[in-house]
Image (cartoon, rainbow, N blue to C red):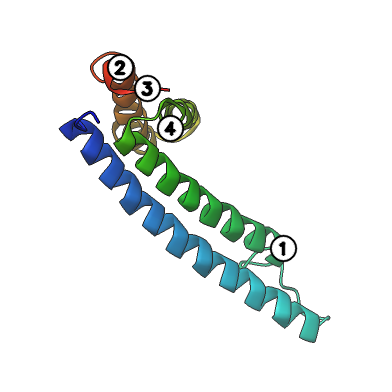
Amino acid sequence: MKKTPLGIKGLSISLYFVATFLLILGLIIFLIGYSLEKYASQNPDANYYGSLGNPVLTIFLGISLFFIGILYIFIGIGLWKGKRWARTLFVIDCLILILIGILFMVFANTLAGIIAEVIITMPSLRWVIYLYTKYKDFFED
């Protein structure tokens, strides 16, 4: 078995932290949506589409974030073990984040664009390049 490079270990550990955050956030948002739905069913005259949002969409967002967190755990484990499928999934995720970062840079105000570039786009681009150059030989079928 190949020894996992330090950069891949760091990436996997950071994915575990992000996954934990997404799992907790997804659970909290799901519970908020569930509470809103329960409130709306008990009070049919109440306008619950105000600042708190649509309960069905809130529940869907919570479930989505929870499953993305689970996916990040599997990607982190796969990267640690050198699995090519994990690298592919992570690169697809990075490309989506790069697109989101570019959209923020174009359509958001100046400060948000700079923050998006520094926090989202540049690290994602760096990892895509590293996974296909520096760490290319580590990944197997």
Do callouts 2 and 1 mark residues in contact (Cβ within 8 Å)?
no
Residue 5 on image: x %, y %: 19, 30
Q: Tag 2, which secondary structure?
A: helix
> Circle 1 is placed at which residue position?
56
Q: Residue at x 29, y 32 (%)?
A: 118
Residue 9 on image: x %, y %: 22, 39
Q: Which is nearer the N-term, disc 1 or disc 3?
A: 1
> Circle 3 is placed at which residue position?
140
Looking at the image, is 80 positioned above or below residue 32? above
> Circle 4 is placed at which residue position?
86
**Quarter occupied by residue 94:** top left
Q: Nearer the viewer, mark 2 or mark 1?
A: 2
Q: Which is nearer the N-term, disc 4 or disc 2?
A: 4
Looking at the rendered structure, the kind of residue marked 2 is Lys
Distance from the alpha carbon under mark 2 to that under mark 3: 9 Å
For the C terminus, the image quarter is top left
Q: Tag 4, which secondary structure?
A: helix
Distance from the alpha carbon under mark 3 to that under mark 4: 10 Å
Looking at the rendered structure, the kind of residue marked 4 is Ala
Relative horizontal placement of residue 123, taking residue 44 as reference (left or right): left
Distance from the alpha carbon under mark 1 to that under mark 3: 42 Å
